[in-house]
Amino acid sequence: MDFGDSIKTCFTKYADFNGRASRSEYWWFVLFLALAHAALALFGHWPAKLFSLATLLPSIAVASRRLHDTDKTGWLQLIVLIPVLGWIAIIYLLAQESKEPNRYGAAA
């Protein structure tokens, strides 16, 4: 999946917590979010904050689908509430290879 397809897919499935998301889909979307946030921050604090708020639900949904692709529950995202170690753990989990077959359906 390329950059444009991943953004389109993530916004199309903005509240879909079912199914799976490939590694490329997730990480291209994360790159888009980081670049857009940085660009909006040039215009001030509020545009960047509003963008982050507007993309919060799609971000959580795609991370949940990404965890499903590794055969883990989306609730593991709550691990980020643990300072420092939680962030390291979630990055590790999101970067893992897809597990095939798994209980969350066919690969994306």
Image (cartoon, grey):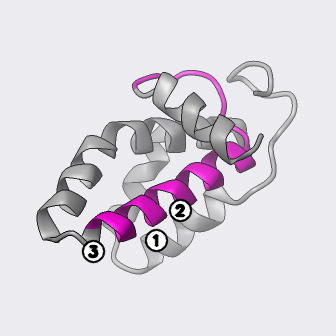
Residue 97 or residue 56, whichever sits in front:
56
Q: Marks 2 and 1: in contact by CB < 8 Å? A: yes
Disc 2 from disc 3: Cα separation: 29 Å
- Quarter holding the C terminus is top right
Q: Nearer the viewer, mark 2 or mark 3?
A: 3
In the picture of the structure, the residue carrying the numbered disc 3 is 42
Q: Nearer the viewer, mark 3 or mark 1?
A: 3
Q: Is residue 30 magenta?
A: yes
Q: Which mark is residue 10?
A: none
- At label 1, the amino acid type is Trp
Task: Count numbered badges in the picture.
Answer: 3
The residue segment tinted magenta is: 15-40
In the picture of the structure, the residue carrying the numbered disc 2 is 90
Relative side of 31 to 58, left or right = right
In the picture of the structure, the residue carrying the numbered disc 1 is 87
Question: 10 Å neighbourhood of mark 1: few (<14), some, or many (≥20)?
Answer: some
Give coordinates of residue 90: x percent, y percent: 53, 62
Disc 1 from disc 2: Cα separation: 5 Å
- The residue sitting at the left extreme is 46
Q: Quadrant of residue 58?
A: top left
Mark 3 and mark 1 lie on one chain; the one further toward the N terminus is: 3
Q: Is residue 23 magenta?
A: yes
